[in-house]
Image: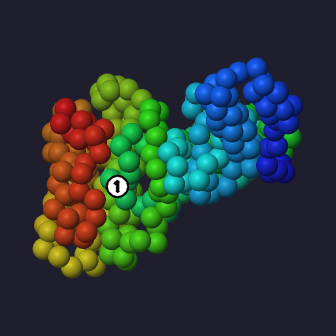
C-alpha cells in the first residue's frame, strides 16, 4: 500500500495576488474579493489526496463523483457535504493489476459489509445516499496501492452530520438489521444479468437458493427477539423461505415463475414496517425499494 500523506496545495502566490488586487477596487468589491479569497484558501487547505482518506472523513469530490479522482475536499461532517468514508480494506494481489472488473466486484461485496457495520439501518440514511468506492487504478497499483475506500455519497445535493450510527443500536435491533440487510444484499448480488428466465434458469435457481439460505439465517435470528410484530414477520419470512426453496428446485421456467412470484412478494420491504416500528427502527421505505416492489 502506498504511503498516505495529506496533500498540501502551493497556494501562497494566489493568496498574495488576491490581496494585492484590493488596492484597485472599491470597499464593497474589496470585501467580496476578501471573502472569495478566504473561501478559496479554506477550500485549498482542505484538499487531500484520495489515498489519504480515513474512515469517518466527510468530503466533497472535485468534479464528478464518477471516474478517476486524485483530490477531494475534506470537511467537518457538521458542514454540508456529498460523501463520507464508511470503511476501507486492502485488495490482495501481486504486481499485475487484476483488472477493473475484478476489483470492482470485490469492492461491491466488501463495501456492503463495511457500510453495514458503519451505518446498520439503511432506511435511516438521507435521501439519495448510495454506496460507492474509490479503488486502485492500474497506475496506482503499479506503485503498490491496494487500498479501497468505501463511501456513502449523493449524486445531487448534500447532507449534514455523520452517518456513523453503529454504537446507537441495541443487540435485538442489530440482529434484525444484520439479517434483513443480508437478505436484500443477497437478492441483488445474485441477480442474473438477463431477465430471460428460460435462458438463464440455472442462474435464477442459484439466486433463489442463496436468498432462501439468507432468509433461513434471518428467521433463526428473529426467533430470539421478543415482540408480536416480529413474530408475525418471522412467520411471513418462513413462508417466503419455503417459496424461494421451491424456486431453487423448480424443474422448469413455469414452475419457477409460480414460486418466484410468491417468494418475491413475501419479502416486500413493506411487510417489515410493523416489526421495525416495534423495534424502534426507521420505518420509511427507501424510494428505490418502494419503486421496485410497486412495479
Label 1: which secondary element: helix
Give the camera-side residue of 52 and 274.
52
Q: Is residue 250 visible?
A: no
Q: Nearer the viewer, residue 6 or 104?
A: 6
Q: Which residue is at a point 82% across and 27% down the rendered structure image?
A: 20
Left or right: residue 150 versus residue 122 is right
Q: Quadrant of the C terminus?
A: top left
46 versus 62 height, above or below: below
**Left or right, 250 with reference to 103:** left
Q: Residue furthest top?
A: 24
Residue at 18 percent across and 51 percent down: it is 270
Point out residue 231 in the picture as x, y percentages from the top left corner: 16, 71
| Residue 108, x across and y down, in percent | 53, 44
Q: Is residue 212 above or below residue 16?
A: below
Query: Which residue corresponds to the image point at 35% horizontal and 63% vertical from the top-left?
Result: 177
**Residue located beneath label 1 in the image:** 124
| Residue 28 position (above or below residue 12) | above
Badge 1 density bin: few <14, some 14–19, many ≥20, Cα 10 Å: some
Amino acid at each position: 500500500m502506498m504511503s498516505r500523506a495529506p496533500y498540501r496545495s502551493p497556494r501562497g502566490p494566489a493568496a498574495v495576488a488576491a490581496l494585492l488586487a484590493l488596492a484597485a477596487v472599491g470597499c464593497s468589491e474589496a470585501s467580496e474579493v476578501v471573502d472569495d479569497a478566504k473561501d478559496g484558501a479554506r477550500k485549498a487547505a482542505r484538499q487531500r489526496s484520495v489515498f489519504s482518506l480515513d474512515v469517518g472523513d466527510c468530503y466533497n469530490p472535485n468534479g464528478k463523483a464518477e471516474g478517476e479522482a486524485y483530490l477531494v475536499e475534506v470537511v467537518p461532517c457538521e458542514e454540508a457535504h456529498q460523501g463520507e468514508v464508511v470503511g476501507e480494506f486492502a485488495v490482495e494481489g501481486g504486481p499485475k493489476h487484476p483488472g477493473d472488473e475484478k476489483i470492482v466486484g470485490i469492492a461491491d461485496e466488501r463495501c456492503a459489509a463495511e457500510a453495514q457495520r458503519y451505518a446498520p439501518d439503511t432506511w435511516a440514511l438521507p435521501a439519495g445516499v448510495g454506496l460507492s468506492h474509490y479503488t486502485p487504478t492500474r497506475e496506482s497499483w503499479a506503485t503498490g496501492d491496494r487500498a479501497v475506500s468505501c463511501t456513502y455519497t449523493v449524486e445531487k445535493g448534500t447532507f449534514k452530520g455523520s452517518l456513523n450510527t453503529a454504537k446507537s443500536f441495541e443487540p435485538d435491533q442489530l440482529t434484525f438489521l444484520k439479517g434483513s440487510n443480508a437478505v436484500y444484499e443477497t437478492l441483488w448480488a445474485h441477480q442474473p444479468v438477463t431477465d430471460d428466465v428460460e435462458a438463464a434458469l440455472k442462474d435464477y435457481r442459484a439466486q433463489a437458493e442463496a436468498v432462501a439460505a439468507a432468509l433461513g439465517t434471518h428467521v433463526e435470528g428473529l426467533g430470539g427477539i421478543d415482540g408480536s410484530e416480529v413474530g408475525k414477520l418471522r412467520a411471513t419470512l418462513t413462508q417466503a423461505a419455503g417459496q424461494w426453496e421451491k424456486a431453487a428446485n423448480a424443474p422448469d421456467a413455469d414452475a419457477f415463475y409460480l414460486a418466484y412470484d410468491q417468494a418475491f412478494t413475501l419479502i416486500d420491504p413493506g411487510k417489515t414496517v410493523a416489526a421495525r416500528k416495534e423495534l424502534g427502527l426507521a420505518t420509511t421505505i427507501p424510494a428505490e425499494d418502494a419503486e421496485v416492489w410497486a412495479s
